[in-house]
Image: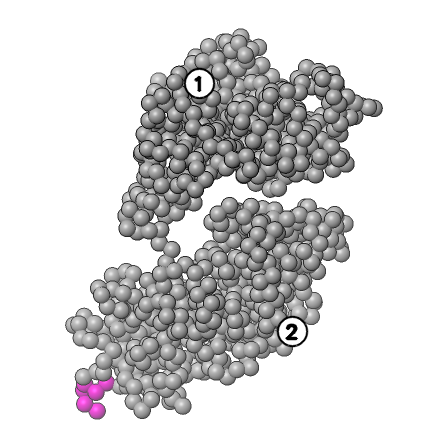
Amino acid sequence: MAHQRKTLVVVGHGMVGHRFVQAAVERGLTETHDVVVVGQETRAAYDRVGLTSFFEVGAEALSLLPTGAYDDPRVRLLLGTEVLGINPEQRRVHFAEGDLEYDELVLATGAAPFVPPIAGTDLDGCFVYRTIEDLEAIRDAAAGARVGAVVGGGLLGLEAANALAQLGLETHVVEMAPRLMAVQVDAVGGATLTRHVERLGLHVHCEAMTSAVTGEAGRVTGLELRDGEHVPAEVVVFSAGIRPRDALARAAGLDVAERGGVLVDEQCRTSDPHVWAIGECAAPAGRMYGLVAPGYAMAEVVVDALTGGPGTFTGADMSTKLKLLGVDVASFGDAFATTPGALELVFSDAVAGTYKKLVISEDGRTLLGGILVGDATAYGVLRPMVSSGIALPDNPEELILPAGRGGAELGLPDEAQVCSCNDVTKAQIVDHVAREDAPCDSPACVTRCSGAGSTCGSCKPVVKKIVEDWFAAQGREVDTSLCEHFAMTRAELFEVVAIHGYTRFDEIVAAHGTGRGCEVCKPAVASVLASQLNHHVLEGPQRTLQDTNDAYLANIQKNGTYGVMPRIAGGEITPEKLIVLGEVARDFGLYTKITGGQRIDLLGARVEQLPLIWRRLVDAGFESGHAYGKSLRTVKSCVGSTWCRYGVQDSTSLAIMLEERYRGLRSPHKLKSGVSGCARECAEARSKDFGIIATEKGWNLYVGGNGGASPVHARLLAGDLDTETLVRYIDRYLMYYVRTADRLQRTAPWIESLEGGLDRLREVVVDDALGLGTELEAAMARHVDTYFDEWAATLDDPDKLARFVSFVNAPDVPDPQISFTTTRDQVQPAEVDGPVSLGATIPVGAPR
Amino acid sequence: MSAPTATWTPVCRLGDIEVEGGVAALVEGRAVAVFRTWADEVFALSNYDPFSRASVLSRGIVGSRTSGGEAVPYVASPMHKQAFDLRSGQCLDDATVGVPTYGTRVEDGVVLVGPERTTQRETGQEPGTEDE
């Protein structure tokens, strides 16, 4: 019988549905099955765990499938599509447009927020907290409101309260249980948490039953509590738990659990052998799991089953760690000491607001669980100790005492699960750095390749520690040396140069390096010197340090000719200047092309032509565009409010101002920017190292974006800034980057490398947490004040010009290696194989 | 002119070459890259980079790399950074690739470039020294 491809239908495209498809592709299920994924929301799967960050980073940053489609053509994604019913007997899925037959069906329909059955929940101003659309609606409602309330003080309720507070509302939290986060923390932990939350200005009402939502003229006015109290609120968010979305299974007659959820066996198979259920809609052994990690585990189990594997799901680690309003809360293992004979070891500091409890086995040898409030740094080490059951040290209190080792130095066994979200063990992490084939060279690389730390991020410090320990054990510390000549990072080199006030490579390599340098450290030193001194890069001994392009103030092309790119700030250019560019290109026989940075590249210039071309350009009012430098390239812009009927700010003027401010700033890597005059974002500012998008009130500043091989969207650093504040923040941001980034490290990986990432950057730039603000601004002011055009300065200096010749002994003889062909009426490099000689009869000049 | 007396072409003054820099010179119709090291030694290689097939080696960064316990002076191609030993023309990143070298000497502050020395490379004669 011919092999026939089967059809696998996945209903639900949330985090778990997406993970299932990823696993199906990775593990070869698509070799035998066509996969159809049906999502009810119009968006592809997004990170619901990080939902609250939507307000900061926007929907795109949350997306788990930014392209909106899977690379594997055998996976079809149908979004905005409702499944009306399923028929397990006929193996059909019903849609409004018709039916789809399946061989296997996976239900990943998730859960719905529980809204208590009380009066008034349908009033305007009542919301749930589940989707990006919910958050958009809450944001819109909060814009005109002053007070908000959240019904539910659990994990999700506090997330929602956090969001309301961030939106500027006076916020009430109404919880039925005697404490906040009753599922995760005990009475003392709850009290500690409440003190933290109240100190931040939120109102906490525990043991408070909401009996009705009050309203006026169809709009919510508050909550009525059973004891008669009235909590005023113009925005109400229900976040009092979730219920499995099991309606399709119920209607189809599949077994469901008593408390809801599609009943499944250990392989996540429902009562029909060809229907499976995973994630929050499923109830393995009758119990539902409201966390993402068990959902991921179920997805893996079903892929395993469909590929003939033995995997089973027999319960999950319900450990939780989160940070709300700056308060760390973690709960793991047997947090409530339900194991017979379990012992508790408690450290509590009411002044500092920390509460830590370890639950230890009767024999005192193993850690069973614990609760951490106020400081959860030990979580990364404690949780794997529970799952791996390794023996406790003799003084377990050291694990939670403030001055203790935090446990980070404790050796974890290989089988210890470090990342519970993605089920990655210590052994797997070590394998990623130790493997022969394409090993990882950094903790960030391990996170990308293994998934460890990529979901909630709480294990990142442990991942880092494991990777560094491994390197140390190999005697090859994570090598941050620039090269064999300098055993320091670029940031350290920057400090050394600044402290000693060095101005020459010779002094630096003699005092802090070995040997005579190379093509790695010389340009790095040249860049550091240029950032600090802003001298001409071709000045004296600096010349021989410069990388290929800086050395000739132009971009070398494949045949040894150069591209010349004058600055066209903001992409704005007069007709007269356009004509000059055309004339210069025509007169020197150059190829012209419009670049992505809104300027014009003139290609094919021989080295000896460069000064002649610059002369013409400088005389016409042009200057170097630094297209050759690790420095600011362009600030792209749209026409903004001056021309565009949608524009809300003058983006072109701002772009020109910024480009002229930061032009010539030598940095660890190239810098690109863009300014958009409205939220339509025509200047593509979010693909830039710093991008600015106009708002009604001012400017939003986004940082850390780039295009290229690994595109990254810039993320919001600060919003609604006036121009002066915007410039101050960019000054600080760029100078901090120039000082601390590694060589050739773009801003996105640099931000990722900061301990604390974007949040840390915001502390430094916006809150001035390091007290560096004034210094960074002053450094930028120096740069701005000392800026000069490198092309014009070169034309004025015969010493610098002397090098722009074809041959030192025959400056009038063009390099015979360079020849051109013509395509579409313009020159192109001709392919030449082997060295081209001139006849020996060509007369050559004698030395001067 | 006796047979072993090859043609030596004066190309420039030593001071025309920056320390740890290079210049391109035209020697008997061929493009030659002439380098000056920190120790004021002068080396000459073909200017043609066999990887990028462009005549550009004189524009590379001059560096040193520790290999077998000694500091090897080299030039890194400005195109894709392959390193060539200034003394032998041998590519340090690909044992199968090398570029021709030329004899050099400095007389009265004038740099002279001599004949191609590919055979000397094979016979192991110390390059960079004066011919014969």
Secondary-structure class at tag 2: loop
Q: Tell me the kind of residue under disc 2.
A: Gly
In the drawing, does residue A380 fall left or right of residue A659? Answer: left
Residue A783 visible, this angle: yes
The picture quadrant where one finds residue A570 is bottom right
Residue A621's disc number: 2
Predominant SS along the magenta part: loop
Q: Nearer the viewer, mark 1 or mark 2?
A: 1
Same chain check for tags 1 and 2: yes
Residue positioned 60% across, 48% down in the render: A717
Q: Which residue is mark 1?
A: A338
The picture quadrant where one finds residue A673 is bottom right
> As displayed, is residue A586 above or below residue B111?
above
Name the image quarter holding the C terminus of chain B: bottom left
Q: Which residues are magenta?
A: B1-6
Q: Tell me the kind of residue under disc 1.
A: Thr
Q: Position of residue A445 (x, y in %)?
A: 41, 45
**Is residue B5 one of those drawn in magenta?**
yes
In the drawing, does residue A789 fall left or right of residue B21? Answer: right
> As displayed, is residue A446 above or below residue A672?
above
Q: Position of residue A110 (x, y in %)?
A: 55, 22
- Return the chain for callout 1: A
Q: Position of residue B56 (x, y in %)?
A: 39, 70
Secondary-structure class at tag 1: loop
Residue A213 visible, this angle: no
